[in-house]
């Protein structure tokens, strides 16, 4: 059974291995609370996972170490296990979903582990790891449902209480539940008055559904840009700990997550992956009762693939009203497009691209359709442009 002395022991073992990451104010996000970020995205390996993986490996017997270790991961636990195993002179094999970001796959190899890519999602990688563990006798390092791993993650809770003693609420991402189990246990044991909230992706709400239904739930499928928390079923240990120590669990959708990633980059100069941004998204979109309180959001990781980041930025710009495409029907005669562009320029929008279509079965026979992609300030600015175009007699289709 998990106890607070185990978490303090983990903190001692991790000293000099894992960084004591900073807590920074996030007043530029304007979320209606006194917001701070616990920057585990700046941890060695780029995520909190190093803590639990390293501590687990450090506590293995010589016999277990000699067998080598195997793990399954969406990418971040993989890097933690790879680095921990290499530091301890242990062979490591990691099963990763075939769709894991290339950056995470290559980083895992770079830390010294052998990688086995498995078709499907995290749960399929887990099944393959168990199969290989039984076949070859490796020592299995679970990514979340292990008390030593949970104790390692719980060291973050100790650091939050030390770095911000008057904290009133802590918001934590949830995948399988190892991170929030350790953080919530540490905080609630030492400061039961502090609220601990969990956040899941709406496309992978396994823990949220499990708590609601009163038993661990297995989802048929998961779909989210937050690949690090795309878990079909929580662990048995983590389910029990969340049920006992977590005050509330909410979900955020991919658009909200993308907007949070963009806001963190643009306003706070912090790079977060999808899983690392969901806590901030929950506060930004007022999913939790934290108005006016001193709140820490745990930015759990920053290992976002560059191609994914490009798509997320585009999605985030659209969600926040920073990018919009107008579709306008015009009469096909000189001066029409000029009139549209003048109206847009007068309102301070920037034209990114113009597409002109003469062949359109829905338009008048002497008409045409233009698509204007604009750089705008926000959704209110888009509405202002739409009203201006319509008042000038232009037929705006969207």
Image (spheres, rainbow, N blue to C red):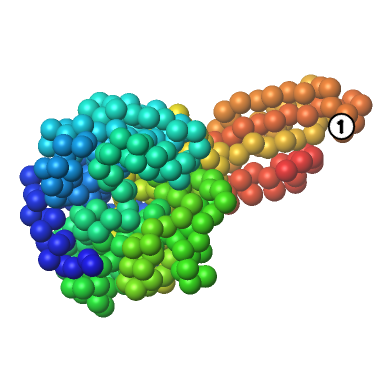
The answer to which quarter of the image holds residue 329 is top right
Query: What residue is at 45 percent from the left and 45 percent from the top?
Result: 123
Give the quadrant of residue 188: bottom left
Q: Is residue 260 visible?
A: no
Helix, strand or loop at disc 1?
Answer: loop
Looking at the picture, how far across and down is residue 259, in whole percent?
47, 47
Q: Residues within 10 Å of mark 1 (few under 14, many from 20)?
A: some
Query: In the image, residue 147 lies at what x, y percent?
Result: 25, 59
Q: Is residue 203 left or right of residue 109?
A: right
Q: Position of residue 108 (x, y in %)?
A: 29, 31
User: Left or right of 94: which side holds 3?
Assistant: left
Q: Name which residue lies at 54% across and 36% down.
A: 375
Is residue 82 left or right of 275 when viewed as pictured? left
Q: Residue at x 42, y 57 (%)?
A: 234
Seen from the viewer's position, the closer of residues 261 and 27 is: 261
User: In x, y percent, where is residue 224?
Assistant: 51, 45
Of 62 and 373, the residue lying toward us: 62
Q: Is residue 118 above or below residue 243?
A: above
Query: Toward the viewer: 129 or 366?
Result: 129
* Picture quadrant of residue 2: bottom left
The quarter of the rendered structure image containing the N terminus is bottom left
Horizontal side of 153 relative to 96 (left or right) equals left
Q: Which residue is mark 1?
A: 363
For residue 6, say whether it is visible.
yes
């Amino acid at each position: 059974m998990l106890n607070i002395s185990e978490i303090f022991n983990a903190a001692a073992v991790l000293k000099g291995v894992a960084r004591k990451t900073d807590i920074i104010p996030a007043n530029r996000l304007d979320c209606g609370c006194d917001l701070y970020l616990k920057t585990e995205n700046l941890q060695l390996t780029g995520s909190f996972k190093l803590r639990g993986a390293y501590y687990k490996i450090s506590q293995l017997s010589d016999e277990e170490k000699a067998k080598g270790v195997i793990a399954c991961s969406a990418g971040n636990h993989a890097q933690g296990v790879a680095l921990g195993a290499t530091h301890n002179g242990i062979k490591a094999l990691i099963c990763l979903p075939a769709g894991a970001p290339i950056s995470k796959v290559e980083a895992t190899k770079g830390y010294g582990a052998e990688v086995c890519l498995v078709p499907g999602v995290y749960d399929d990688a887990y099944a393959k790891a168990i199969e290989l563990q039984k076949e070859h006798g490796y020592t299995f390092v679970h990514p979340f449902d292990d008390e030593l791993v949970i104790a390692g993650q719980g060291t973050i809770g100790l650091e939050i209480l030390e770095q911000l003693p008057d904290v009133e609420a802590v918001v934590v991402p949830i995948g399988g539940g190892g991170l929030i189990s350790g953080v919530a246990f540490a905080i609630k044991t030492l400061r039961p008055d502090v609220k601990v909230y969990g956040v899941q992706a709406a496309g992978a709400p396994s823990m949220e559904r499990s708590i609601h239904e009163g038993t661990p739930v297995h989802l048929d499928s998961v779909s989210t840009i937050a690949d690090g928390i795309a878990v079909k079923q929580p662990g048995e240990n983590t389910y029990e700990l969340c049920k006992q120590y977590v005050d509330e669990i909410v979900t955020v959708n991919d658009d909200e997550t993308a907007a949070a990633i963009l806001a963190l980059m643009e306003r706070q100069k912090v790079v977060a992956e999808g899983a690392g941004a969901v806590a901030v998204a929950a506060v930004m979109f007022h999913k939790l009762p934290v108005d006016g309180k001193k709140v820490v959001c745990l930015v759990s990781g920053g290992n976002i693939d560059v191609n994914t980041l490009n798509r997320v930025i585009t999605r985030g710009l659209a969600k926040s009203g920073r990018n919009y495409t107008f579709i306008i029907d015009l009469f096909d005669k000189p001066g029409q497009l000029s009139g549209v562009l003048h109206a847009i320029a007068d309102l301070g929008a920037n034209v990114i691209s113009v597409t002109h279509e003469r062949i359109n079965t829905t338009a008048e026979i002497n008409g045409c359709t233009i698509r204007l992609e604009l750089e705008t300030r926000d959704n209110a600015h888009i509405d202002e442009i739409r009203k201006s175009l319509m008042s000038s007699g232009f037929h705006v289709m969207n």
